[in-house]
Image: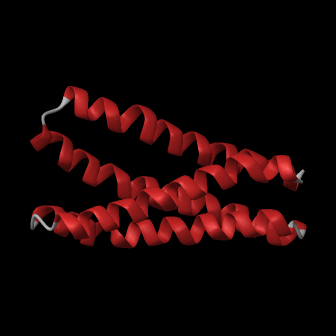
């Protein structure tokens, strides 16, 4: 029963990330001007990071209860990655606002790589078991 909940949580995490990055963000840039898209994305991405972090925390607790070592690793990595993404958002935004392209690219790339790690680990861990 607990493994089914963990799989469901991984599915939710993967679905939310895919929906946000593959549908919402590109649609925003097609529909809104750059001036309007930026504030919207600045508001929505921190919420994504916190939502996935909360789901990861629940998965982490379930993995501890069920002694699921692989789930424990995946949900811990997911939680830590999403918290890092959340906490670098202000610096990413500041770098963009100040025209510091080098810092922006580094911080944004960090966020993207961590999000991809979370997505792939949550998509794939259930097949390794």
Residue 20 picture quarter:
top left
Image position of 105 with respect to 36: above or below: below
Q: Position of residue 50 (x, y in %)?
A: 47, 61
35 left or right, relative to 110: left
Instruction: Identify which residue, 108 or 31, lies in the foreground.
Output: 108
Q: Residue at x 63, y 62 (%)?
A: 56
Colour scheme of this structure image?
secondary structure
Q: Position of residue 115 (x, y in %)?
A: 50, 56
Q: How many marks?
A: 0
Which quarter of the rendered picture does the C terminus lie within?
bottom right
Q: Residue at x 54, y 56 (%)?
A: 52
Residue 28 picture quarter:
top left
Residue 14 picture quarter:
top right
Q: Position of residue 91 (x, y in %)?
A: 25, 72
Image position of 13 with respect to 85: above or below: above
Single out the residue that lies furthest toward the front.
102
Q: Residue at x 53, y 67 (%)?
A: 81
Q: Residue at x 24, y 70 (%)?
A: 103
Image position of 22 with respect to 38: above or below: above
97 left or right, relative to 53: left
């Amino acid at each position: 029963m607990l493994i089914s909940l963990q799989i469901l949580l991984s599915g939710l995490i993967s679905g939310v990330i895919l929906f946000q990055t593959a549908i919402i963000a590109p649609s925003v840039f097609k529909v809104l001007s750059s001036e309007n898209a930026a504030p919207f994305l600045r508001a929505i991405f921190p919420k994504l990071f916190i939502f996935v972090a909360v789901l990861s925390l629940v998965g982490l607790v379930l993995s501890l209860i069920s002694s699921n070592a692989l789930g424990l690793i995946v949900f811990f990595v997911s939680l830590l990655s999403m918290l890092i993404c959340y906490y670098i958002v202000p610096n990413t935004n500041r770098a963009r606002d100040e025209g510091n392209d080098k810092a922006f690219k580094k911080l944004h790339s960090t966020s993207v790589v961590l999000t991809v790690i979370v997505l792939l680990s949550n998509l794939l861990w259930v097949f390794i078991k």
